[in-house]
Amino acid sequence: MAQKYEVRQMQQTQQVKPNPFENALEQLRIAAEYLKLDDGIHQMLAHPKRQLTVSLPVKMDNGQTHVYTGYRVQYNDARGPFKGGIRYHPGVTLDEVKALSAWMTWKTSVANIPYGGAKGGIICDPKHMSMGENERLTRRYAAAIAPIIGPYQDIPAPDVYTNAQTMAWILDTYNTLEGFMSPAVITGKPISLGGSLGRDKATGRGAVYTTVEAAKANKIDLKKATFAVQGFGNAGSNYAEIMQTYGPKLMGASDSKGSIMSKGGMDANKLIAFKEKTGSVVGFPGSQAISDKELLQMDVDILCPAALENAILPDTAKGVKAKIIAECANGPTTPEADKVLHANKVFVIPDILANSGGVIVSYLEWVQNLERNYWTEDEVNSMLEKKIVSAFRDVHAASLKHDVDMRTGAMIVGVGRVADAVKILGVFP
């Protein structure tokens, strides 16, 4: 009963927040105006190609059966197979998954890799599930979506509260159903199963590469800069660890249990070790507790929101002091907050650019699986840097050309490439 209550409470909280799919459609509308898109193509890009909702009965450790709800939304595959992560969270909704699948479509396009966009999710609370329950839920979900995924159809990956182990279970379930080993069906796998070196830190590393480029564009000396990270999970902690090697000092961080700051700065590696030991950044020696809003409004040069969507609302945006925002999370800034940040001359590296490192290295993993040829970590990181820096420059050029913020510039680039593919393909029959 406690789990049902938590899910219900989370869903009620989610309902009062801006609808993420409406945010995604508004971003698309703005890009369509700049691109002068044909209305028919605009309408095609405003609708997912396929939406799958599945019921997932799972036998729990106590012997009872609980039925979970899962989704897989395949948004657009004009430029290549569907690609997108799977998240486990009590607040998952169909509109959220639709929005994430749309953003993934533009993200793969901005990165200029031959993929479309998709996303998956299950309404559950993995923090209150055993390993066995998690595995049974994962395998049930994998079996349910198996008919619509595949190496040339749809390639899932990890997202919120899923990891390499989750992907291994999905891979094994898919292989069992198909009758042969097909490592290219999924990315973010363990190295021993064909995963790519460098994949575990790719999202954070890619965001760092874009932050370095943004600092150059804004004439910020990183050796004298400061930064804060909202959401000290995988992407956020990796961002902090790699970012500090360029010189900036970590001043604040947060996770689901609270936010902290330190006037003297914090060593990211020590904070990571502390969280691994205690389960949270809260209580880190030399730090003091602050509110989540205070963290987002800290007087730092760089802010990295790396938690969930809708973190930065208009009221919060008004007090943001950072000069650069690097969006490691998907959809952390609402369209109205975007306007406030742009008016205040905050340089936002949008999610579909900033956090595209994960999907870029997922693409590299997929290529390695298909070719059965594997690269070193240095080779992977080098290819990641080359691709994401090129993407940053394409987006920055578009934003300067149209005199718009970076998000609109990214949408112009991403939507434009997908629209061109849709137009050339035509409509069947």
Image (spheres, rainbow, N blue to C red):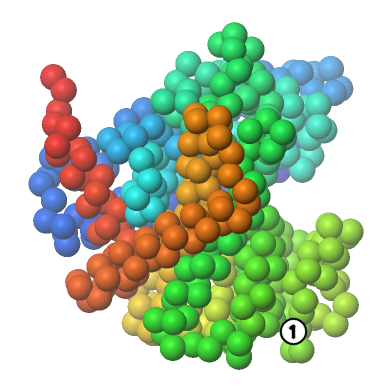
Residue type highlighted by circle 1: Gly
Picture coordinates of residue 341, whole percent (x, y)? 40, 77
Judge by depth and name the residue closer to the eye, 345 or 209.
Answer: 209
Judge by depth and name the residue closer to the eye, 427 or 398.
Answer: 398
Evaluate whether residue 88 shows in this view.
no
Q: Is 417 on the left-hand or right-hand side of 328?
A: left
Q: Tell me where residue 314 sits by quadrant.
A: bottom left
The residue that appears at 44% across and 76% down in the rendered structure is 214
The residue that appears at 37% across and 62% down in the rendered structure is 390
Q: Which residue is mark 1?
A: 265
Secondary element at tag 1 = strand
Q: Quadrant of the N terminus?
A: top right
- Tell me: residue 127, above or below residue 172: below
The residue that appears at 69% across and 57% down in the rendered structure is 233
Evaluate whether residue 50 shows in this view.
yes
Q: Tell me where residue 266 sits by quadrant.
A: bottom right
Q: Is 160 on the left-hand or right-hand side of 97?
A: right
Judge by depth and name the residue closer to the eye, 127 or 393.
Answer: 393
- Tell me: residue 161, above or below residue 312: above
Q: Quadrant of the C terminus?
A: top left
- Tell me: residue 227, above or below residue 10: below
Q: Is 105 on the left-hand or right-hand side of 140?
A: left
